[in-house]
Image: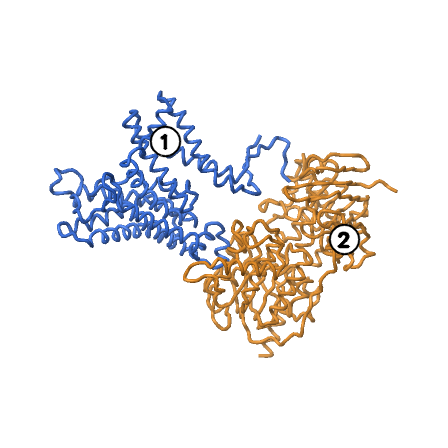
Amino acid sequence: MPTPRLELTGIVKRYPGVLANDRVDLAVMPGEIHALLGENGAGKSTLVKIIYGVVQADEGDIRWDGRPVRIADPHAARKLGIGMVFQHFNLFETLTVAENILLGLDGRSDLKALSAEIAEVAERYGLAVNPHRHVHALSVGERQRVEIMRCLLQDPRLIIMDEPTSVLTPQEADGLFVTLRRLAGEGRSVLYISHKLEEIQALCDTATVLRGGRVSGHCVPREETPASLARMMIGHELPHVARHRRREPGRPVLAVEGLSVPAPDPHGTDLKDISFTVREGEVLGIAGVAGNGQRTLLGALNGETAAPAPGMIAVDGVAVGRLSAGRRRALGLAHVPEERLSRGAVPAMSLARNTLLTAHGKGLVRHGLIDFARTRAFAQGIIERFRVAAPGPETEARGLSGGNLQKFIVGREISLEPRLLVLGYPTWGVDVGAAAAIRQEIIDLAEKGTAVIVLSEDLDELFEVCDRIAVIAGGRLSPLRAVGEAGVEELGQWMSGGFAGAARKADAEAGHAG
Amino acid sequence: MLVRLEPRLETSRAMRLASPLIAAGLTVLAAVILFSALGRDPASALYVFFVRPLSSAYGLGEWAIKATPLALCALGLTIGFRGNVWNIGAEGQLTMGAICGGGVALAVHGEAGWWTLPLMLAAGALGGMAWGAIPALLRTRFNANEILTSLMLGYVALHLLGYLVHGPWRSPEGFNFPETRLFDEAALMPVLLSGTRLHAGVILALVAFAAVWLFTARSFRGFKVDVAGQAPAAAAYAGFARSGVVWLSFLVSGGLAGLAGIVEVTGTIGQLQPVISPGYGFAAIIVAFLGRLHPVGVVIASLLMSLVYLGGESLQINQNLPLAVTGVFQGLLLFFVLGTDVLVRYRIRIAGLAGEEA
């Protein structure tokens, strides 16, 4: 048997109150794409930090090409030949691609020679990157290519990719897979972190599955089914999201007409002429790669950013475009923001008080005074119904894991029994089991007559819960498609902005019809 | 080498409660060093500072009446500070309260009745409120920094008082001293305990304490203020208007500071003078933080701060030290309070040369 490129044995890492890694074994062979699979909090990030030298293991051995090593810091890791592409990019917006790459390399200074090298590596691996462009003008996918390029120029023999497809369109993800296979073909190893089962089956040769800090299985993904992988990952069968008898959508609840809003923050995306309608009992999905105007759209719908004219947004026929968030909530709007800590919840306040944040109209305040008993009971109800892992209503919001806090916030907004619920990335960072539960609650809520809008990057999720889907790209909204008629191919193209023609066509058809 | 502050994952509740005590202890320690450096015996100086002022009934009364304006101002400021609204101008609002309330006393001179004092108190509170409304308006309309506007308006108020007592309101029988007439008997706070100067203003401070406690601990509006202070984005998300918090903070803190001003004038001075407060409005900022922005803590802290004032006077009389010692004490106290607070919430990390960002 050949020597593994990287071999970890009996890795243990303890944090106060948590055993993040418990006797983890992992072996990555040369030329292998190895998946590291697990839910949030399963210990993937800790393990990767140990490999990249960001933190040190408390126990266990690391071998590199069969020889024991100690990786003291990321510099040492890079010297060994370990490269990492982070989920969050580390690029300077105002510098060019080549300048950014130069800054990230240890001990290089010749920009011209580097540019030539970039062009050559780009050619070899199918990474379309122009070294002379400025980073602020690049799309998210292009930025990722810059990060990968930076990693490749150090000639790594093990490349760690941390959830790389979460920011990519399906087509961009396919392009990335081609690059990764080419790298593996040269004998480089790839450690690929993800919780997306399909893509691991398509891409990876072997997989190590983590659950609760321990290895719950080593396997060959192609020989498994999504269900068996999920079982290894979450310890039981993946719950199935059930759609009951769908009723016909009722009256329109939300009507958006020609909405154009400048982004409140300088790096945001402006909304351009967005129109759509959501009816009672209908779930509308808005897909798109992050940074294409989602944040501006959520702010404009919620009322944190006022629309230029009142009539651009109407709830049940009432023009709300210039009403405050508080007034819109009084009309029955509920909202799950994309930022859960500090926006969806006050970090240092208890869950009970965080319930009050939006549920104060549910009889929790009397004569201006807070009814603490009722507030606690309401919070306890959310905790039980949505299976939030929290000791009780007095737990501080910041004490919850991201996924649990998300369950709490989604639960709170659903418990308001709103007319209209706007969800931004409802299952982002939530484990697979809880994500299924949240999707079920969304469907159940819609079946009671609530109009629902879901913004998500996860197409599978949108296909599962939505009746109609549109794509937001560059601040514009694509035409809407019924779920049955929407194809991944078409939506993927729209995600990179290629729906101008389709939009005109739809307009023309509407013109003919009218 | 690089010294860095790193947020602690968990702040110890015990340390959070103990930190004001640690700060007080460190202040005493610094005082010992200070007294030694000035060539005084630290033990007797500390005795004169902290114990002697409280060793008589009269002294205890003084303790309470000095704590009263501090508590009134600091209770009001507490609400604003919890909501991230920085009213630094309580001194000016206090002065405006004294001017407006005192103006009533002067206007009804010779005809005062049972109604005079309540009318003065109301006028004082409204005067402080009106003065607080200016920075609130500038903040909500023009986004002007309330720290600067409220501070600057404080000096405007002080000079307005100076103008009035030197000019139009100067007492005709006052031998040209810059003072107004002495107020009528009916325009003065009743004394609660004979042999002391303890006056009914203390009761107003206790009522204010109860009201502010109810507001911060139980009311929904108080909750909104807390959300605005701790997580502005969450307040925006929930639809709690920022301007509402700014207005509420300034009207309440301005009103209570104005009340403190008229209480001080009717309770201890009995007329308007060029200076009516030894910096109560500024000291109240320290008091609010020392009391951890909690009404109970604020009352305790105002008693402590009052003792610092009394101790400073006592030192001046008995040990021949300058009154500036009081200011030094206040400064040390605030320094240590904020310092221990930082260390409760953050740890100091000294990163070596080998450390690298990941």
Residue A427: quarter of image: bottom right
Mark 2 sits on what residue?
Answer: A178
- The hue of chain B in the figure is blue
Outermost right residue: A1
Element under disc 2: helix
Tell me the residue at 78%/45% (across/down): A189
Label 2 resides on the chain identified as A
**Residue A160 appears in the figure:** yes
User: On the rendered image, what quadrant is the N terminus of chain A found in?
Assistant: top right
Q: Secondary structure at mark 1?
A: helix
Q: Crowdedness of circle 1 by 10 Å Cα count: few (<14), some, many (20+)?
A: few
Q: Vertical placement of B351 versus A121: above or below?
A: above
x then y, percent, for residue A164: 69, 51
> With respect to residue A159, does A165 lie above or below?
below
Horizontal relation, residue B303 to residue A68: left or right = left
Display colour for chain A: orange
State the quadrant of the C terminus of chain A: bottom right
Q: Nearer the viewer, residue A167 or B48?
A: B48
Residue A281 at what x, y percent from top left?
60, 72
* Residue at image coords 44%, 35%: B23
Label 1: chain? B
Residue A500 visible in the picture: no
- B252 displayed left or right of A161: left
Q: Is residue B260 left or right of residue A238?
A: left
Q: Position of residue B290 (x, y in %)?
A: 41, 40
Q: Position of residue B248 (x, y in %)?
A: 37, 54
Q: Amino acid at mark 1?
A: Val
State the mark number for residue B328: 1
The one nearer the camera, B152 or B339, is B339
Q: Pick out the residue farthest to the top.
A: B39
